[in-house]
Amino acid sequence: MAQLAAGSESESERELAPRRPTMATLNTLAIKAPVDVDFRDITYVAGKTTILQGVTGRFSSGQLTAIMGSSGAGKSSLMDILTGNRLRGVSGSVLVNGKPRNLQRFRRVSCYVMQEDILQPNLKLIEAMMVAARLKLDPDLSEHQRRAVVDEVLAALGLSHCSSTFTDKLSGGERKRFSIAQELVNNPSVIFIDEPTTGLDHQASSLCVRLLKELAHQGRTIICSIHQPGAAVFKQFDQLYVMTTGRCAYQGATNRLLPFLDAVGFECPVHYNPADYVIEILHDSSKETIDQLVNRVKNGKCLITDPEAKSSCSFSSQELSLTESQEDWTEKKLSTKCTPFFVQFSVLWQRTTIQIMRSKVTLLFLLAAYVSGGLATGLAFFQIGNNGEKPLAHFNFMATTLVTASYGQILAPTMMYPSEVTLVKRECKNGWYSLNSYVFAVTTARLPFMHGVAVVYVFFSYFLAGQPLELDRFLWYTLLFLIVSVVSESYGLFFGSIFRPQMGAIIAPAFVSPLLVLWQYNMGAYHTTPLFMRIIMSTSFFRLGMIAMILALMEDRKQMDCPEIFCPFSYPKTLLELVGADGQDMTVNIAGLLAMILVVRVMWYLTLRIRLSSDLYSTCCNCVYKLKKR
């Protein structure tokens, strides 16, 4: 009852409790070195369009910095470049503590909280946090130590009161703070956050940014991209980086923005939000005026530190250099241990298993569909198993079974998996786990649950249809149903990783339908089928399944019952010859199905790999767009 009460309370009630949380230093976590992020002359060209035009800047530790600008100013592109998610088409340099960035090491001490708060479903907040702790913290820590870290992070972000709440029941402000809490588990030195206030009301936005400011003042470097914050939120940022048309129009202290604008002839009205005012200037001013602002800060090379001074360069060689001892100490402090593959696999397998077991509605619907389908199939072909008078009924029974296996598993992942891809992309890029461990964990965790319920269909359909009461035939029948289901699910995961749910729901059935038809091509005259058509037919998992199932149920059987004087198809061998299955090896067809599972799963893996690479994915999307225009 307490859990239900926690999940059903209103957002306003639950936001009231953590309104004034006391931020405590995260003492349990290892103290890491401060990290300053510098970028110089960053230019980004996508196709024929120049997105960023030689911008320069510095984001210092211990400060909360806002990258602000209107839509299309280049905020997201700059964030992607600094996090290392975008490398192609980029020139310039990114420095960490004055040294060229080592991307692999940098990703271990940084994280990127994306705008969409897509969270793992069917997990309580504390469970999701413990998953993050097991994947991100030192593998040598005990479970008790990990729990202490999690409790400390939740207390610091004001989330302890909802630790038993399921993630999908969290309010908007709690979801945003929870997204940050998951990344804060391993105490990253640099935190990038894309639009932290999107979708939040004024109170929740102010609370979220205030907590980020306190986290930054503990020594972290926190950079937020934000479109147009309210006045109260704007004042909480320490530093501001204003962008327009891919250039820097202001870099410096937030409270120095208005004096800077006033010095160039723009006086902000009293009681007017400075954030709104600077965006309006950049939107409404002429190119010459914008060029004046950009030149004033030398496109980010100068930092406004004093209202009396026009500009003050902050990037002296002395500031950016480190002594040899400092460099060694810094790298030692920034180093982190990688979680072993087996640990990643184990944690992800447990998480996926819990999520599937708690998806009771999905499992019940799937079970109901298989029970009703098995009863319908068994009654439609009631006791035809030993009837030699109706040869087509045997083929139709097998075809119905495999159609059920195909469509029963392809649509669910096609419709539900696209949201999972975004989540995997975020977690992999933030160093939670490798894509290899994720693919293996999801594949093995789904097998017993998503396909285990299919046994009820096999049971009802097989025995109601009066198929031979032989254990080996029943087991082969069951195995073939499950293998075809796994092939179909593999296609569903593949399409779900490429298309949105609406598009995938159209493309997946349209792709599978021709494969279902190919098995009937030239039936009765298979030996006269041209070689190239045989090759095409062999690509149909449905045909491979049909041939294997016909062999499993018809090979080496006695003559079937025949109420007429003469039934030419009462001999199972005749039916095998009709579809060209006579002389074929069932294990070869099963091997073909297993190979198809492997091939499609590899395609799914490669698609995820492309999706994880922003540069490669953008290139593929551009190629598809150009083909569509032609």
Image (spheres, rainbow, N blue to C red):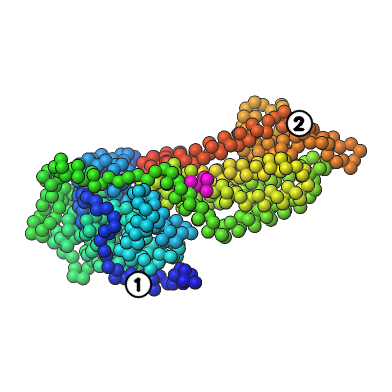
**Element class at badge 1:** loop
Instruction: For mark 2, give the secondary structure.
Output: helix
Q: Which portion, as a residue range, is magenta?
A: 441-445
Most extreme residue toward the left, as rendered? 308
Q: Where is residue 482 in the image (x, y as percent from the top left)?
A: 62, 44
Residue 64 visible? The answer is no
Q: In which quarter of the image is residue 531?
A: top right
Label 2 crowd (10 A; few <14 / some 14-19 / many >=20) = some
**What amino acid is labelled 1 in the image?**
Ala
Tell me, yes or no, if residue 140 can be seen here. yes
Q: Which residue is identified by label 2?
A: 577
Residue 451 falls inside the magenta stretch:
no
**Amino acid type, label 2:** Glu
Q: Work out whether mark 2 precedes mark 1 in sequence or the reverse, and give the earlier one.
A: 1
Q: Is residue 628 left or right of residue 187?
A: right
Disc 1 crowd, CA 10 A, few/some/many (<14, 14-19, 20+): few
Residue 444 falls within the magenta-colored stretch: yes
- Tell whether 40 sits left or right of 614: left
Name which residue lies at 49% across and 38% down: 602
Q: Which mark is residue 17?
A: 1
Q: Quadrant of residue 511?
A: top right
Residue 31 in percent (x, y) is at 24, 53
